[in-house]
Structures are given as C-alpha cells and as structure tokens.
Image (cartoon, rainbow, N blue to C red):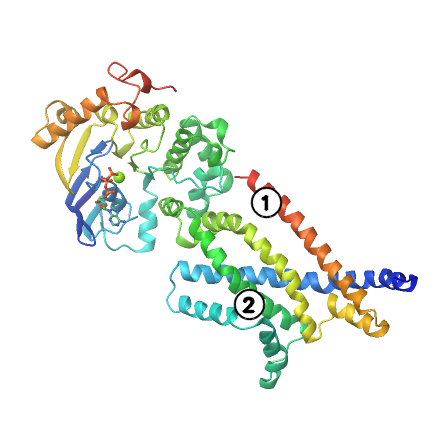
Amino acid sequence: MTERIIQELIDSFGKLLMAGLKVTLPLTAAAFSTGILIALFVALMQIAKVPVMRKLVRVYVWIIRCTPMIVQLFVVYFGLPNIGIKFTPFVSAWIVLSLSIGAYCSETVRAAIESVPVGQLEASYCDGLTFWQAMVHVIIPQALRTAFPPLSNSLIGLVKDTSLAYNVALVEILATAQRIASRTYDYFWLYLEAGLIYLIFCSILTVVQRKAEAALERRR
Amino acid sequence: MLELRNVCKKFGKTVVLDNVSIKVNDGDVIAILGPSGSGKTTLLRCASYLTRADSGTLVIDGEEHDMNRISGKELRRYRNRVGFVFQNFNLYGNKTALGNVTLGLTVAQKMKKEEAEEIGRKLLAKVGLSDREDYYPSKLSGGQQQRVAIARALASNPEVVFFDEPTSALDPELTGEVLNVMRQLAEEGMTMIVVTHEMEFARSVANRVVFMEGSVIVEENTAEEFFNNPKEARTREFVQRSLSWRGADDASDGTSDGTVADNAPAGIEEKP
Ligand SMILES: Nc1ncnc2c1ncn2[C@@H]1O[C@H](COP(=O)(O)OP(=O)(O)OP(=O)(O)O)[C@@H](O)[C@H]1O
Ligand SMILES: [Mg+2]
C-alpha cells in the first residue's frame, strides 16, 4: 500500500461516511419505520380477521417474498415512468425497502402479538376497553418488546440492503466509493472501505440493540 | 339486581350449560361449587360476555340483555357495572400495579390521569398494596398479583364482582391474603359471585351456595343449610367428600384458608 493510496483512503473516508450519514441512514430510518407500520397493519388484519383485507395482505406478503428486491426496485424506478408515475431514486428505494420490511416482519409481529396471553385481552374487555384500545395499550407494547430482537436483526439487514439502491443511481455509500474508484482505479481499496463503513454502522447498531434489550428487560 | 335466566351453552355437541338460572340480590355473596367440568367457569364467562351463550337473558337492575347478542356500546356499559377476577390474574404485563388498576378508567372511561390515580391508590391501599404501586406484575408474588387484580376489578365501582377460582393458581400459603381481602369486601356489602373450591370460605363468607354438576344447578341453598342440611343426596355426598378431603389430604387440594386451623393439617396453615 503506497502513501498515495493511504492518502486517498483518508480523503475518501469522510466522503463515504457522509454518504452513509446523509443517504443510507435516512433511507434506513424511513424504510424501517414505514415497514414496521406496514407489518403491524398486516398482522392486525390477520389477527382481527378483517374480511377481504386479511386476504389482500396475504397476497401482498406472497408477492413481496417471492420476487427479488432488485426486480421490484427496477419496476418502481424504471418501470412506473412508462405509465406516468415517477419517483426519485430515494423515494423508489424507500418504497421497495418498506414493502420488504413490512412483508418479512409481519410474521414476526403477528407471532409476538399472539404470544401475549389472551387472558390480558379478556381482562381489557372486562375493563371496558375495545379490541383496538386493548391492542394499543396492552397487547402491542408487549408484543413489540418480544419482537425486539428479531426486528433489530431486520434493521441491521436493512442497512446492508440499502446498497441495492446503487442500481437506481442513488448516491449512497457504495455508489460514492464506485465513483471515486472509477477515477483512481483503486477498486480494491475503495470497496473494502465501503464495506468498513457498513461494518461500523452495523456494529454500532448491534451495541445499541444489546443495551436496549437489557433496558427493556429491566422494565418488566 | 342481577339475574341470569335460562342460560344455555354448548361447545360443539357437548352441553356445558343447560338452562341455568341464578338470581342475585344486592349484597349477596354466592359461592358456586361443583366438580371439575360442571360448567362453573363457563357460566361466569357467559355472564360477562367473554363467552357467547347460545341463549339466555341477563337482567341487571331491570334492564334486560340477550346473552347471545349485544351491541358493543351496551356491552361496554354493562362491563363497567361488573368486575371479573380471573383464576390466573391476567394482569397487564406492561403496566405497574397502579397502571393496571387505572387503565380502564383512563382509556375506557376517559377519566383524567390524576383522578384515576387517586382512585387507584385508594383501591391498592384497600387490598394492602400501597407500597407496591410502582411494581410490575412480574415482580409481585401470586397473592399480590391477585390482590392487584381485585383492585382493578373494583376500579369502575362495579355493582357485582365475579371471581373464578381466585386462589386456585396460588401456593397454599398465599391463599389467605386473597381470601382475607374478599372477606373484607363481603363485609362491606359488595355483591359477589365466587366460583371456588375453598369450602371453608364458602361456609364462612357466602350467604348462598349454588352447587353445579353436569351442566345444571343441582342445589341452591343458604350456605348454612347447604353445609349442615343439604337437600339433595348428591350434594350431601359432595359436601362430605370435600370436607373429609380437607382433614385427610395434604396441601395439594388448596383448601387452606386460615380460619379453621383446628382441623387443617399443620403444613397448610396460613402465613400472612
Ligand atoms: N373453549 C372451550 N371449547 C370447548 N370445550 C370447552 C371450552 N371451555 C370449556 N369447555 C368444556 O366445557 C365443560 C365445562 O367447562 P368449565 O371450564 O366451565 O368447567 P368448570 O366447572 O369451571 O371446571 P373446573 O372446576 O375444572 O374449572 C368442560 O367439559 C370443558 O371441557
Ligand atoms: Mg373453572
């Protein structure tokens, strides 16, 4: 490794980090929060046995799970403009990643909701609560606690999946590394550096996850 | 004040309640006794609409309700007028003791938090748990959990409280503290329907006893008559058998109560 490469890596580190902070993290946060809401919605439609909707959400989960994410991304970003719907690269990635999190986490959320003893739902009824009030105040808070470890894993997976958005010209970590390397031809070092940035982000999340789990454990 | 008329319930082909009727007067403490599987739990659950009866009429203060169909609004109004204490407590795991007592008030009745907490604190004091209001259920003993559950059932100031074997899930040494709270409630004139295997509690606290077997009421009597001079042969047999269990068996039948230490085996005396 020459001095020139070391200097180049130091210069690019800041750029990759900024791409991570300005693009990858916001995309992760947006897609994860939307995705969890979708997952909750899907789970509740099935648990409350809402007619029609419970069937529709199953079709949604089926389609998302059985098609590659990159195909979905191409359909949204390159395909939809054909029928007059245009999204920016960021929004396209946001939509596809949220739908993916929603589908994959819906089973986790449903199992977690069903793991809360049904007696607590009955007790809520006896307290005069409606089904939805019981869900919001009693059942879902406990379910999310149970689902916290698997959901954190999905979050960490999502950080890495944002790199798919490279394919729709979103200038995130990987695309930034690619651009620099295409000028200097140091692909090896820059892609390693891009990997390092993901490694740092995901390690921080892992530590936060462990701390949060311990804190949740103390509160029950 | 509360009357159940001709309650019928089948699970599949099994008849669990066959035209069961009960009339409850103000201040009554009714013990429902009977062997396992006779439909006692199902009766209480139907009376609080946790299980939908196939047919039957419920009358509360002259208001009639179909036990098979009721609108959500009427149901919630009715549920504020009755309380339910479960065999396995069913406390909300994400709420403190105080939060458990106040949830129905703040969420269902839209009461202000401070007002609800004032009521909650009074009720926790009543069941002897003032020093535990910030504890989560997992940090409370079974007896303490059940006392919180009783406080919760009382929060909406109900006219009648249903208890389904409130001490059956407890270690024998913890049943006394729960029974004492119930005894105190009875003395204050609370109307209560208690499914129980605690013969001594039924004898000393209840004014009436309903004996169920095979999905029907076999005998309904005053507590005194029921234990001393039962009408039905079947009842006599049941009373004799359950009283002799108490003397002979060990703690496993869970009938320790503390008030009758004379013939209770030494191991199951109440340790409050
Ligand atoms: N959800 C259900 N589905 C099917 N059968 C049920 C259900 N709940 C109760 N049963 C049946 O109904 C009958 C009466 O049950 P119930 O729980 O009311 O009896 P119990 O008198 O409370 O008995 P125990 O003293 O054991 O609590 C039993 O034969 C039981 O198997
Ligand atoms: Mg029962």
Mark 2 or 1, nearer chain start: 2
In depth, the one of B20 and B257 nearer the eye is B257
Q: Residue furthest front?
A: A1
Q: Secondary structure at mark 2?
A: helix
Ligand 1 lies under 8 Å from the Cβ of mark 1? no
In depth, the one of A135 and B156 nearer the eye is A135
Where does the image place residue A158, in percent across and percent down from the top left?
62, 61
Q: Residue furthest bottom?
A: A82
Where does the image place residue B188, in percent across and percent down from the top left?
31, 26
The residue indicated by pointer 1 is A213
Q: Can residue B232 be seen? A: no
Packing grade of label 1 (10 A; few <14, some 14-19, many >=20) is some
Where does the image place residue A114, in percent across and percent down from the top left?
42, 52
Chain letter for mark 1: A
Packing grade of label 2 (10 A; few <14, some 14-19, many >=20) is many
Q: Is residue B103 left or right of residue B41?
A: right
Q: Are marks 2 and 1 on the same chain?
A: yes
> Can you tell which mark lies on residue A153?
none
The residue indicated by pointer 2 is A99
Chain letter for mark 2: A
Question: Quadrant location of residue A123?
Answer: top left
Location of the C terminus of chain B by quadrant is top left
Identify which residue is drawn at 10% across, 24% down.
B229
Question: Quadrant location of residue A89?
Answer: bottom right
Identify which residue is drawn at 52% across, 60% down.
A105
The three-letter amino acid code for the residue at tag 2 is: Leu
Where does the image place residue A147, in percent across and percent down from the top left?
52, 51
In depth, the one of A39 and B65 nearer the eye is A39
